[in-house]
Image: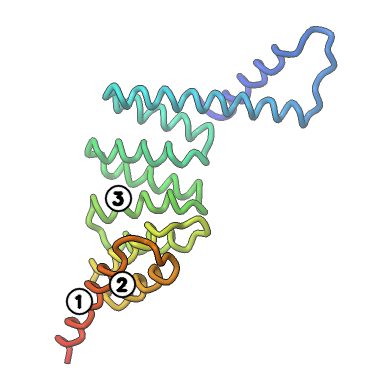
């Protein structure tokens, strides 16, 4: 099923709901009605995706998540959950491609970038790719402290303690109440000091 089929189904339902002899709705009202039906179908399908997940039927859950994003490419949770299931079942190349598709369809979503970055960091241990992806997430207007924290951790894993320290300091300045920042900053600073001392 793709977006065109969903829209055709929505139009059919919308037209069927108009009483005989009633004046047709304006184009704006029709579009709003179609959008509302489209949203309900997508949300109901997402609920089915969740049911498959809780029953352990991961292939069907992944398939449903793909249908959801074909109907609504901004449904970033469907990309994230579907890719995570692919990752969890050992299909790492498919998972990476699905995470990347989520970013390409939602270039301003720090959530989508964060999910791919965490995949690089935690699963593939590809810290250079994690750095690049978390840099992207941290640059998005809707980023949060966790995007920045993961960027700092990623810098440490590529021995860029100077950048890790400056990132932890930026987090401390921007989110003064964020937990565990000072202990991470102190650790990164100690590693930076040791790195500099070894190069003397």
**Quarter of the image holding residue 24?**
top right
Q: Secondary structure at mark 1?
A: helix
Q: Residue furthest top?
A: 20
> Circle 3 — which element?
helix
Q: Image check: 23 left or right of 33?
A: right
Q: Position of residue 88 (x, y in %)?
A: 24, 38
Of circles 3 and 1, which is in front?
1
Q: Which residue is mark 2?
A: 164
Dot 2 lies on which element?
helix
Q: Which residue is mark 3?
A: 119
First in sequence: mark 3 vs mark 2: 3
Quadrant in which residue 38 is drawn = top right
Horizontal and vertical percent position of residue 87: 27, 41
Q: Nearer the viewer, residue 9 or 183?
A: 183
How many marks the image carries: the answer is: 3
**Mark 1 vs mark 2, CA separation in Å:** 10 Å
Query: First in sequence: mark 3 or mark 1?
Result: 3
Residue at 41 percent of width and 53 percent of height: 113
- Label of residue 114 in the image: none
Which residue occupies the foreground of this view, 12 or 137? 137
Q: Are marks 3 and 2 in contact (CB under 8 Å)?
A: no
Q: Nearer the viewer, residue 9 or 195?
A: 195
Q: Note whether 153 is above or below 102 in the view shown.
A: below
- Tell me if residue 47 comes above or below residue 192 in the rendering: above
> In the rendered image, which residue does mark 1 sit on?
191
Q: Position of residue 199 (x, y in %)?
A: 17, 88
Going by the image, does 29 lie left or right of 68? right
If you read the primary sequence from the N terminus, does the residue marked by circle 1 or circle 2 appear first? 2
Q: Name the residue located 29 percent from the left edge and 23 percent from the top edge.
A: 57
Q: Are marks 1 and 2 in contact (CB under 8 Å)?
A: yes
| Vertical position of residue 49 compared to residue 178: above or below | above
- Tell me the crowding category of disc 2: few under 14, some 14 to 19, or many 20 or more residues within 10 angstroms, Cα based: many
């Amino acid at each position: 099923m793709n977006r065109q089929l969903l829209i055709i189904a929505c139009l059919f339902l919308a037209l069927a709901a108009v009483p005989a002899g009633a004046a047709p709705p304006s184009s704006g009202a029709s579009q709003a009605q179609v959008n509302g039906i489209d949203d309900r179908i997508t949300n109901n399908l997402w609920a089915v995706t969740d049911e498959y997940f809780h029953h352990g039927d991961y292939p069907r859950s992944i398939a449903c998540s793909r249908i959801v994003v074909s109907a609504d490419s901004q449904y970033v949770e469907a990309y994230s959950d579907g890719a995570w299931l692919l990752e969890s079942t050992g299909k790492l190349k498919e998972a990476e491609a699905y995470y990347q598709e989520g970013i390409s369809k939602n270039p301003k979503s720090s959530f989508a970038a964060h999910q791919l970055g965490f995949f690089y960091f935690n699963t593939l241990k590809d810290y250079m790719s994690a750095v690049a992806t978390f840099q992207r997430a941290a640059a998005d207007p809707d980023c949060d402290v966790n995007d920045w924290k993961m960027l700092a951790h990623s810098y440490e894993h590529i021995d860029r303690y100077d950048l890790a320290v400056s990132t932890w300091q930026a987090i401390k300045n921007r989110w003064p109440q964020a937990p565990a920042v000072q202990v991470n900053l102190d650790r990164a600073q100690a590693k930076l000091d040791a790195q500099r001392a070894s190069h003397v």
